[in-house]
Every structure is written in structure tokens, then in C-alpha cells.
């Protein structure tokens, strides 16, 4: 098994109290499945619109409309993002930390998310009366190092 780490955060249109409920539920789901992990670099931070645009840049080329929708209202929220970096070296059902976290997060299309997953349980929110948004982000294997480096660059984590 290899030590993995991933970035996870609850998005900034979720009230901080609810964000903590979602993080606790994530931990419950991981521990219930036998995951052994540590949480490092807990953060509460207001990302600007420009930071959101840079963060979600990888999807811009393939999905320009979604990128625009996702970034237009971000950074204008009254709430911060709340999250942390998780580290662990376990395997459950053939999944390491990154894929286990993404599994309990649930499908990005809410209607396809299992009801027990984070996205299935907490659904989605309509932001500023515009587009529907999922409640949380978990980095993919191919984006995690980039995501963490951006958060370091912006001073969100050390």
C-alpha cells in the first residue's frame, strides 16, 4: 500500500455549521469502511473568483459552459470553504484513500449518487438563484498534487 493524500472541502455556499456536519459524515463513512487516515491542514478560507477560475481551469477546455457556471458566483459567497487534507495508506475493496474518499463523496451528477453518499445525502444547493451546485469537492488522483500546490500558493495550507 502506498501513502496517499487528497484535498477535500465543502463549498462556500454551505453554512459553516452544515459544512462541519458534512465533514463529520465523511469521516464516519470512511471509518465505517475501515479507513485509517489522518487529517492535516484543516482550513477555513474565502477563495476569490479568480482563485476559483484557476482551481477549476482543468475542466475549462472540455466543459467551458460548466466552468463558467461554476466560477461566476464563486468567491462572492458570505461563507468560506471548509476542509482539510487527508493522508492514509490503506486499501478497501481495491481502493486507496483518494478513490475511497471520492466513492463516499458520490457521483457528481446528483441523481446518480447513491443515497448514503455525501452528495446523495446532502444533495445539491442552488447558488444565488442560478445553477445547482454539489456540496463538496474531493481531488482526483491526477489533480491532487496540483490542487494542493494551488492551496499552498494561496496561503490556504502550509
Image (tube, grey):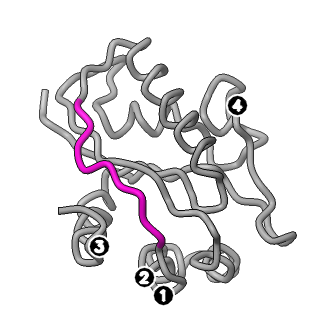
**Residue at horizontal 73 percent and vertical 38 percent from the top:** 112
Q: How far apart are the two marked residues, 2 and 4, measured between alpha carbons?
A: 29 Å
Label 3 vs 2, first from the N-terminus: 2
Depth check: 59 or 87 in front? 87
Is 125 displayed left or right of 18 in the figure?
Answer: right
Residue 38, horizontal then vertical, whole percent: 23, 31
Where is the N terminus found, in terms of image quarters? top left
The residue indicated by pointer 3 is 150
> In the rendering, which numbered label is found on residue 121?
4
Q: Compared to 123, does 136 lie above or below?
A: below
Q: Which secondary structure lies at badge 2?
A: helix
> In the rendering, which numbered label is found on residue 50?
1
Which range of residues does the magenta coloring cover? 38-46
**Residue at horizontal 26 percent and vertical 73 percent from the top:** 155
Q: How far apart are the two marked residues, 3 and 2, measured between alpha carbons?
A: 9 Å
**Residue at horizontal 43 percent and vertical 82 percent from the top:** 54
Is 45 displayed left or right of 108 in the figure?
Answer: left
Label 2 vs 4, first from the N-terminus: 2
SS assignment for the magenta stretch, majority: strand
Dot 2: few (<14), some (14–19), or many (≥20) neighbours within 10 Å?
A: some
Residue 68, horizontal then vertical, whole percent: 65, 83
Where is the C terminus found, in terms of image quarters? bottom left
Q: Which secondary structure lies at badge 1?
A: helix
The residue indicated by pointer 2 is 54
Residue 153, horizontal then vertical, whole percent: 23, 77
Dot 1: few (<14), some (14–19), or many (≥20) neighbours within 10 Å?
A: few
Is 68 displayed left or right of 34 in the figure?
Answer: right
Mark 1 and mark 2 residues within 8 Å of each other at the beta carbon? yes
Dot 3: few (<14), some (14–19), or many (≥20) neighbours within 10 Å?
A: some
Q: Is residue 21 magenta?
A: no
Q: How far apart are the two marked residues, 4 and 1, measured between alpha carbons?
A: 30 Å
Amino acid at each position: 500500500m502506498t501513502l496517499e493524500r487528497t484535498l477535500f472541502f465543502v463549498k462556500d455556499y454551505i453554512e459553516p455549521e452544515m459544512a462541519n456536519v458534512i465533514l463529520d459524515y465523511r469521516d464516519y463513512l470512511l471509518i465505517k469502511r475501515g479507513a485509517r487516515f489522518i487529517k492535516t491542514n484543516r482550513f477555513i478560507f474565502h477563495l476569490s473568483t479568480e482563485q476559483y477560475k484557476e482551481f477549476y481551469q482543468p475542466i475549462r477546455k472540455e466543459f467551458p459552459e460548466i466552468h463558467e457556471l461554476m466560477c461566476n458566483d464563486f468567491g462572492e459567497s458570505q461563507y468560506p470553504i471548509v476542509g482539510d487534507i487527508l493522508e492514509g495508506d490503506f486499501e478497501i475493496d481495491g481502493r486507496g484513500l483518494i478513490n475511497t474518499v471520492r466513492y463516499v463523496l458520490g457521483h457528481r451528477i446528483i441523481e446518480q449518487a447513491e443515497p448514503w453518499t455525501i452528495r446523495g445525502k446532502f444533495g445539491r444547493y442552488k447558488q444565488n438563484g442560478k445553477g445547482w451546485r454539489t456540496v463538496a469537492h474531493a481531488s482526483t488522483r491526477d489533480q491532487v498534487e496540483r490542487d494542493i500546490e494551488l492551496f499552498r500558493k494561496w496561503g490556504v495550507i502550509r
